[in-house]
Amino acid sequence: METKEKQLGGCTGKGWLPGQSGNPNGRPPHKRYLSEIVREMLQEVRKGDVDNKTNDELVVMALFEKALDGDTKAIEMIHDWSEGKVTDSHKFEGDIPVSIVYKPTDAKDD
């Protein structure tokens, strides 16, 4: 059996050589992510608010107002935040034949 000598730079010869870095400057400095900025803004107290409520409290209050006015998306969001999202999972054990029939509802049928 014939053994080949390892080629520098990988199989094509175009890769990194031993001791050579593909990123000589290292990891770039940390940049602020949008999620960090949003979290900071939610914790701030709204300027001019006499009750010293934070922005996250004001957002939740506005969401509750929409829900109380009948906004179904707001109701769904409140439920998901407080109770957790409903997962649609089913567990079957053993050799059980399963058939799933999807029957869309028709809004015209009364």
Image (cartoon, grey):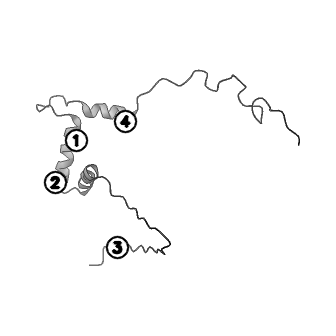
**Which is more N-terminal, label 2 or label 4?**
4
Residue 77: x and y, percent? 27, 51
* Alpha carbon distance from label 1 to label 4: 16 Å
- Picture layout, residue 94 above or below residue 7: below
Secondary element under disc 2, as helix, strand or loop, is helix
Q: Work out which residue is located at the far left of the displayed protein and give it.
A: 50
Q: CA distance from mark 3 to mark 2?
A: 28 Å
Residues packed near mark 3 inside 10 Å, few (<14), some (14 to 19) or many (20 plus): few
In the shown orientation, is residue 65 left or right of residue 77? left
Badge number at residue 59:
1
Q: CA distance from mark 1 to mark 2?
A: 14 Å
Check disc 2 and give the amino acid type: Leu
Give the structural element (helix, strand or loop) at label 4: helix
| Residue denoted by label 3 | 105
Q: Secondary structure at mark 1?
A: helix
Q: Which mark is residue 35?
A: 4
Quick one: label 4, few (<14), some, or many (20+) residues within 10 Å? few
User: If you read the primary sequence from the N terminus, does the residue marked by circle 3 or circle 1 appear first?
Assistant: 1
Q: Are marks 3 and 1 in contact (CB under 8 Å)?
A: no
Classify mark 1: residues with Cα within 10 Å, few (<14), some (14-19) or many (20+).
few
Most distant residue in the right direction: 1
| Helix, strand or loop at mark 3 | loop
